[in-house]
Amino acid sequence: MFGLVLLAPPVWGQSEPVDGDAEVVEACAEATNGDDSETEPDPNCEEDDTPEPEPAPTAPIVPLRIIVTAERTPEEALSVPLSLTTLSETQIEDADITSLNGIADRTPNFTFYSGGANRTGQFYSVRGVSNFNAFSRDAVGFFVDDVPFDFAGFIDQDLIDIERVEVLRGPQNTLYGRSSSGGAVNIVTRRPTDEFEYGGSLRYGDNQHFDSRLYVSGPIEEGVLRFRLAGSYSDREGFVYNRFLEDDVDDGQAFTGRGQLLWTPSEDWEILFNAFVSDYREGGNPYVLTSNDDPFDVDLSFNGFNDVVTNAQSLRIEHDTPNLRLTSITAHRFSRQEAAFDQDGSILDLSINAPDFSSRVFSQEFRVQSPEDADRLQWIAGAYFETASFENNRRFLEGSDSANPGTIEADGDSTNRSLAVFGQASYDITDEFTLTGGLRYENTRAELDFVQTFTTPDGFSFPLVEVDDADVTGSELLPRFVVEYRFSPDLMAYGSITRGYRPPGTSFEPFNAESAIFDAETSWNYEVGVKSAWLDDRLIVNLAAFYSDTSNFQFPSIGSSTGSVAIGTADIRTFGAELEVLARPIEGLEIIAGLGLLDAEFTNGNETFTGAPLEGNRTPFNADLTYNIAAQYRSPGGIFGRLEVIGFGTTFFDDLNSIEQEPFALVNARVGYEAENYGIYVFANNLFDEEYVTQAFDAGAGLAGTYGAPRTVGVQFRARF
């Protein structure tokens, strides 16, 4: 499935001649260049010295058959035999998407649970396959320009200067260097250009939220060396107010920047260097007791802070020959979080959670594949190597009101190594019928050294947990089979069988030696789908249905009395469907809709701490229903309006299904005026001020959680030249 681009790149005021004008021009050209026979003059060809009026701003001409690279080669989205949502540059700007949360909101069966206004502690689910921060490998592969982003706690960032986003649902193992059991999110940034261009946006809204974005691109040596720079800066007050300390909890500042150099020494070589940096200085996680009368007024003994820094570099080298395409991607990424926040959500001096996490990842991917113009046979083969290290120096400061005052301090070092080879081939048996087969072999090793100590207020220390040289290895063969049949250029059906895999690993913060290691997760996944275009491409309808059986599903268990976290394993069964509809009933009007239905439940297993049976319970951190519908209109005079509804079904935040978020919906509205090079808009997000929880847990003193943003209203200005 896919989200089809219904809007052209936002070059406001650009228009094209209609078909009738083109025919007249062609006829006049033939009359001028024809033979010498006498003919009556065509009045349509007579010269007209009347100056043409300046064109008014018009709705952009829309390219409908968009090109994606979901399967590592440029092809029409209608031809990709998997469930795929695509968000174009225009769709991203029209919906004002600036984070992964915004991407998930417009993608069926993709839910994202943010830690309030902060950039860490992010949880998500795709088709019921969920993550739990850094405790196990991410269920979804997140890629920015083919570079994998590691650990859910560090993946959320400001999206700047984005050309396209592709969300692939289901296991992705035979085309990607880093494998994923739930899907892949490809974020493609704009590339350096041969023509000088620049632009940006300014936004100001409630809570004194100021956001600015800027980009500039152009040639250093035309046709050979180009550059692109992009960045963002934001500053805001928080929307959670601490009445006890008379200050905001979750205010913050953020900076992101990206630089690219593109070198094309010849037509068959392309070398791209990409560097990224981010720095977030934010308030503490705004955990609120759910029993509070007002979720945005709290009473905490400590406000806290949250500082996250990231830098990443990559070198991508591509070489095309008449028979082969070769690609090398070398990448490095470092992230660190230093934070402290009130764990108990009250004015009592109970517990301060003070994380100090850092990760470093090196990866190398090689790919060789058939040329883009390959006829019946298209193939790809690749190899991938990754090494990752994670340091955990978290402290829990148990205050004077706790049962055992003192400091619990962790000192953990974990390393992970992955080696993989993968490949896939597609062959057109006939012009309508195609068979695809793929295979991946992956080998992993994870190691952990961990010590947790308790220090009393008088300085006496003793160990609570000691894990020395814990290690686990795993390997797996992962096949994929696909059958697709094209009834016409506008109608295609497909079916697939795919093996999913999440390797065994070590928990970065075990509560005993037995909980330090968890087993591999494997699944068989079955999918059928239809992709179609109707009414001269004015209506796009795509449907997919899926079923999967998963063994040793890796899920989080949280000890309600201790706050300890462990990775449990149990079998689950998942099935559901996804529908996406895009319509353009009249010029300028677009209707974009998505629906996801999901049933994901445990078929056996027990809760880690209590031993309670899980059979029949829903898996945590996924909604059984997701939907989005947006209607927007661009008038020939430059008026833009958009109304959008984003909805969610029931979500459970724990494996025992004792903490529940009921169904809710958010309404967003946007209206503005667009000229040739600029646009100005007024927006309102969460228009009806819906209250909803994004995360929740047992804090000892009661249920605590983070709430989604309240109604926010503001104004935005965009320009590009």
Image (cartoon, helix red, strand yellow):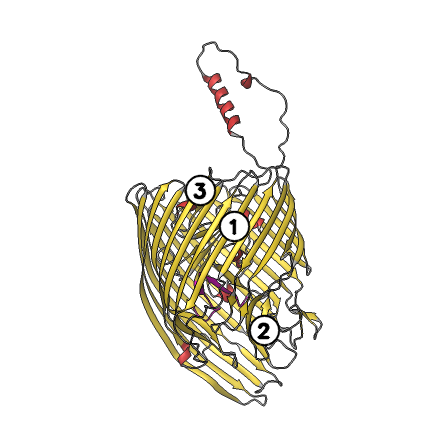
Mark 3 Cα-neighbour bin, 10 Å: few <14, some 14–19, many ≥20: many
Q: Which residue position is annotated with label 3?
A: 533
Q: Nearer the viewer, mark 3 or mark 2?
A: 3
Q: Which residue position is annotated with label 2?
A: 704
How many numbered discs, if any?
A: 3
**Does the magenta stretch mainly form a helix, a strand or a loop?**
loop
Tag 2: amino acid = Ala
Q: Earlier in the sequence, mark 2 or mark 1?
A: 1
User: SS for tag 2?
Assistant: strand
x then y, percent, for residue 708: 60, 64
User: SS for tag 3?
Assistant: strand
The CA distance from mark 3 to mark 2 is 47 Å
Q: Look at the picture and state if 14 lies above or below 672.
A: above
Q: Pointers 2 and 1 in contact (CB under 8 A)?
A: no
- The C terminus sits in image quarter: top right
Q: Which residue position is annotated with label 1?
A: 593
Tag 1: amino acid = Ala
Q: Residue furthest right?
A: 246
The CA distance from mark 3 to mark 1 is 15 Å
